[in-house]
Amino acid sequence: MKTQEQWIELKNNLNIENRAYINGEYSAALSGQTIPVVNPATDEIFTEIARCQSEDVDLAVSYARQAFQSGQWSESSPAHRKAVLKQFADLIDQHQEELALLETLDTGKPISHSFSTDIPGAASSLRWYAEAIDKVYGEVAPTEKDVHAFISHQPIGVVAAVVPWNFPLWLACWKLGPALSAGNSVILKPSEKSSLTAIFLGQLASQAGLPTGVFQVVTGYGHEAGDALAKHQDVDCIAFTGSTRIAGQLMVSSGESNLKRVFAEAGGKNANIVFDDCDDLDRAAAETAAGCFYNQGEVCVAATRLLVHESIKEQFIEKVIQASKAFTPKDPMDPSSSMGALIDQDHKSKVLEYISLGESDGANVRCGGDVDGQGAFVSPTILDNVDNKMRVAQEEIFGPVLCVISFKDEAQAIEIANDSKYGLGAALWSSNINRVHRVAKQLQAGSVWVNNYNEGDMTVPFGGFKMSGNGRDKSLHAIEKFTETKTTWIRLHS
């Protein structure tokens, strides 16, 4: 790991590519317009990106369709796709420092997290799907004697991957891995707030051997470039991670255009339940703090609702307050920093407004709040005496704000946990094996963690229930989302 001075030196010498990547070349938006890029930790504009709009999207989709129909990638052997994607992943690893620096400059997250977690995670995602693609088989149906019916999977076509700003490259590769391995052409649309690592991928894709047009990056605003992709008649699938509101808009756009598939991973308001029979409250407190405050709380599956049994509530809150001190905001370019800045000043204002709203509704601020000075920094904040009906308990704040809610018994804990329009993640802490199984079965969430929070692996699917979305990232289940299932029925004659 570089020192802070070395990271700053690399930043000063870095040549930032800021154009879109269309049909194998970097190019400005056809309109010539750009969007300023702000470093959240310093509030400085340090570059601009291309502001692509519908005409740029039309070009990218046209090239993606041509590439798909040529068969150079879509009809290539799984062994060939595996080799190219493994090389793609290797190139990400080789450029780990530049990519980590771009991620931190764009998002304000700590450089230690970008370097040690986000960028390696992105490479690992591509590598996992590269290894998986030649291990996905078709099926033969158990039909009558003189029929041979087999089920095969073929690439869906042109995929638009629309990804958010909290884990820009990592979440992009959760989409790119299965979509590319299945043989599709992919247009990546990053958030206008965090496009630089996506843009950097363009040159790596070319070096890895992806054919021209198979991978493209269209930058710009969601209501312009993103909307054009959502409504395009020649886009076959939208893979999305972001807010529940936008997920709904994408489904409307699909219905008003060509019924393209929309697989959305949306918001969360996740319950972390600590029972009085938890036998390691110190560990539970440490993971409660990390589960809520890691990545500045800008995590869809963050543990933002702490449900704690009334008999241990005060004791446990004190432990969480102590654990939260490990996430004191600090210059993200400092390798010792474990908490950086929020994505921008507008989002900081939104988070602070929620804290004030919680107070006005009767909650107590036990620690945290605003950080004065330059940059979009907010300290880990704990709101005590929250009622689950309050807006701070029902709405996704997407910041370092923990809502503490007490409960009397197991039934009430389950009722409160499920009293949400979201259903992304949930956790419970208990040493009672019967309680663990009883509660886990009843929690309405796509992922349930027992005596840990947000552990995971590429081998397991990630996604939610209810308004947290309808897609699944990671695992072999994700590949299914980027393929068409075809039945071929053959009548055998003697």
Image (cartoon, rainbow, N blue to C red):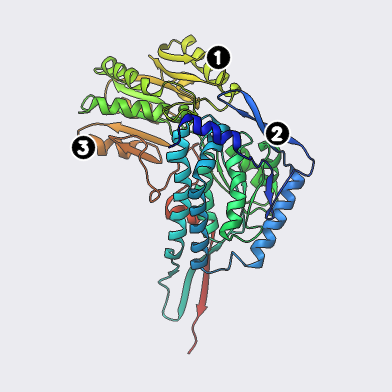
Give amino acid for label 2. Answer: Ile
Secondary element at image label 2 = strand
Residue 361 image offset from top left, x and y in percent: 47, 11
Q: Is residue 399 visible?
A: yes
Secondary element at image label 1 = loop
Sequence order check, earlier mark of 2 and 3: 2
Which one is nearer the viewer's eye here, 347 or 326?
Answer: 326
Image quarter where the N terminus lies is top left
Which one is nearer the viewer's eye here, 73 or 336?
Answer: 336
Residue holding disc 2: 35
Sequence order check, earlier mark of 1 and 3: 1
Q: Is residue 371 above or below residue 158?
A: above
Q: Is residue 362 above or below residue 249?
A: above
Q: Are marks 1 and 3 in contact (CB under 8 Å)?
A: no
Residue 341 image offset from top left, x and y in percent: 52, 25
CA gap between label 1 and label 2 equals 25 Å
Q: Is residue 281 above or below residue 27?
A: above
Q: Nearer the viewer, mark 2 or mark 3?
A: 2
CA gap between label 1 and label 3 equals 50 Å
Residue holding disc 1: 373
Task: Please report the residue visible at 58 percent of the width from the left and 59 percent of the height from the top.
Answer: 184
Q: Are marks 2 and 3 in contact (CB under 8 Å)?
A: no
Sequence order check, earlier mark of 1 and 2: 2
Give amino acid for label 3. Answer: Asn
Residue holding disc 3: 434
Secondary element at image label 3 = helix
Residue 290 image offset from top left, x and y in percent: 37, 29
Q: Nearer the viewer, mark 1 or mark 3?
A: 1
In the drawing, what numbered circle is on residue 342?
Answer: none
Q: Residues within 10 Å of mark 3 (few under 14, many from 20)?
A: few
Give amino acid for label 1. Answer: Gly
